[in-house]
C-alpha cells in the first residue's frame, strides 16, 4: 500500500540536506533515503540512510536508525547502526543501543545505553 502512495521526487542536488518535520510537525512511519537528512520535529519510526542523519536541537525521535554517520543534537531513543561515526552533542540526550565504528560523546551529553562495534548486516 505504501508503494502506491510514494511519490518520486527528482534529485535536483545530491549534496543537499533534506529537512524533515520542522516546527511542531509530528510524523511517524519509515523513511529510506540516499542523501543527508535532518529532523527538527517529532518522529516515531525507522530511518535508513546511505548518508548522514542529523537529529536537530528541537527533535525528538523514537525508533531504529541505520546510516553512514549520525549527529545527535536533540533527543533520540532507540537502536542505531552507524557504519562510520556517531556523535552525541553536549546538549543531546540518547537512550538505547548503539552499533558504530566510532562513538563521540561530548561533555554534557546524556547517554543511557550501550555501544558495540558496528557489524554489517548481511541479510
Image: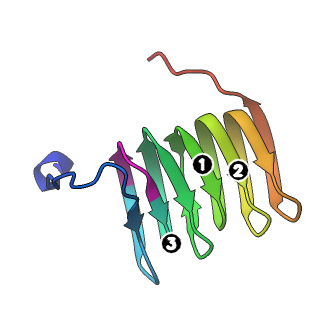
Outermost residue, right side: 107
User: Are discs 3 and 1 less than 8 Å apart at CB?
Assistant: no
- Of circles 3 and 2, the one toward us is 2
Can you identify the residue that label 3 sits on?
40
Query: What residue sits 77% from the left and 36% below the top?
Result: 115
| Secondary element at image label 1 | strand
Check disc 1 and report the residue beneath it: 70
Bounds of the magenta segment: 30-37
User: Within the image, what quadrant is residue 89 found in?
Assistant: bottom right
Q: Main secondary structure of the magenta part?
A: strand
Q: Secondary structure at mark 2?
A: strand
Crowding around mark 1 (Cα neighbors within 10 Å: few <14, some 14 to 19, many 20+) is: many
Rendered location of residue 46, percent (x, y) = 45, 49
Mark 3 element type: loop
Name the spot of residue 111 as percent of width and height, x first.
Answer: 81, 55
Circles 1 and 2: CB atoms closer than 8 Å: yes
State the residue at coordinates (79%, 40%). 114
Query: Quick one: label 3, few (<14), some, or many (20+) residues within 10 Å?
Result: many
- Indicate the quadrant where residue 26 lies: bottom left
Counting residues from the start of the chain, the first of labels 1 and 2 encountered is 1
Residue at 14% across / 52% down in the picture? 8
- Out of 53 and 7, give the one closest to the viewer: 53
Q: Position of residue 18 (x, y in %)?
A: 37, 61
Amino acid at each position: 500500500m505504501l508503494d502506491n502512495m510514494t511519490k518520486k521526487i527528482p534529485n535536483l542536488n545530491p549534496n543537499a540536506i533534506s529537512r524533515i518535520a520542522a516546527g511542531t510537525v509530528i510524523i511517524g512511519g519509515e523513511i529510506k533515503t540516499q542523501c543527508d537528512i535532518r529532523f527538527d520535529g517529532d518522529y516515531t519510526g525507522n530511518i535508513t540512510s546511505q548518508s548522514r542523519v542529523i537529529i536537530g536541537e528541537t527533535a525528538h525521535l523514537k525508533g531504529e536508525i541505520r546510516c553512514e554517520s549520525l549527529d545527535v543534537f536533540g533527543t533520540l531513543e532507540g537502536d542505531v547502526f552507524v557504519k562510520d561515526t556517531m556523535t552525541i552533542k553536549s546538549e543531546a540526550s540518547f537512550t538505547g543501543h548503539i552499533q558504530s565504528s566510532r562513538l563521540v560523546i561530548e561533555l554534557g551529553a546524556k547517554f543511557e545505553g550501550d555501544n558495540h562495534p558496528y557489524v554489517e548486516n548481511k541479510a
